């Protein structure tokens, strides 16, 4: 949230490869690169979303583990925890 300013049009990029997701954002405030170990099924994908939508979706989840489902780089994402399912808006890039 530190890198997200109102009106900022820069997407947060998820670069998902075998065993990890690299999360990148560059904004007028600064830049962040983070790598997280994951369990992945299917093909690698690189996809970007409006960071505000990602933050809003994750704020309503209390679990430490989530499931994210991507059909392709031009489709919405589904985020699931044990109790609910949230649809993330269409990709930004």
Image (cartoon, rainbow, N blue to C red):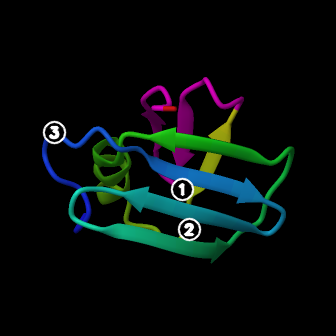
- Residue linked to disc 3: 7
- On the image, the x and y values in percent for residue 35 come to 60, 74
- Residue linked to disc 2: 65
Q: Which residues are magenta?
A: 71-92
For numbered disc 2, what is the local secondary structure? Answer: loop
- On the image, the x and y values in percent for residue 28 come to 23, 57
- On the image, the x and y values in percent for residue 15 come to 65, 54
Alpha carbon of mark 2 to alpha carbon of mark 3: how far?
30 Å
The tag earlier along the polypeptide, 3 or 1, is 3
Instruction: Determine if residue 64 is in view.
Output: no
Magenta stretch, overall SS? loop
Asked whether the beta carbons under mark 1 and mark 2 sit within 8 Å of each other, the answer is: no
Residue at the front extreme of this rendering = 28
The tag earlier along the polypeptide, 2 or 3, is 3
Residue at 71 percent of width and 69 percent of height? 38
Residue 1 disc label? none
Mark nearer the viewer, 1 or 2 = 2
Residue at 15 percent of width and 39 percent of height? 7
Quadrant for the N terminus in the image:
bottom left
Q: Which of the two residues, 65 or 89, is positioned nearer the viewer here?
A: 89
**Is 83 contained in the magenta span?**
yes
Alpha carbon of mark 1 to alpha carbon of mark 2: how far?
9 Å
């Amino acid at each position: 949230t530190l890198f997200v300013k109102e009106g900022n049009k820069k997407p947060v990029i998820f670069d998902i490869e075998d065993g990890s997701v690299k999360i990148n954002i560059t904004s007028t405030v600064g830049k962040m690169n983070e790598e997280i170990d994951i369990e992945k099924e299917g093909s690698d994908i690189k996809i970007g979303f409006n960071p505000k939508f990602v933050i809003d979706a994750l704020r309503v989840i209390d679990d430490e583990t989530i499931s994210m489902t991507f059909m392709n780089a031009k489709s919405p994402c589904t985020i699931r925890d044990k109790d609910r399912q949230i649809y993330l808006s269409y990709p930004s890039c």
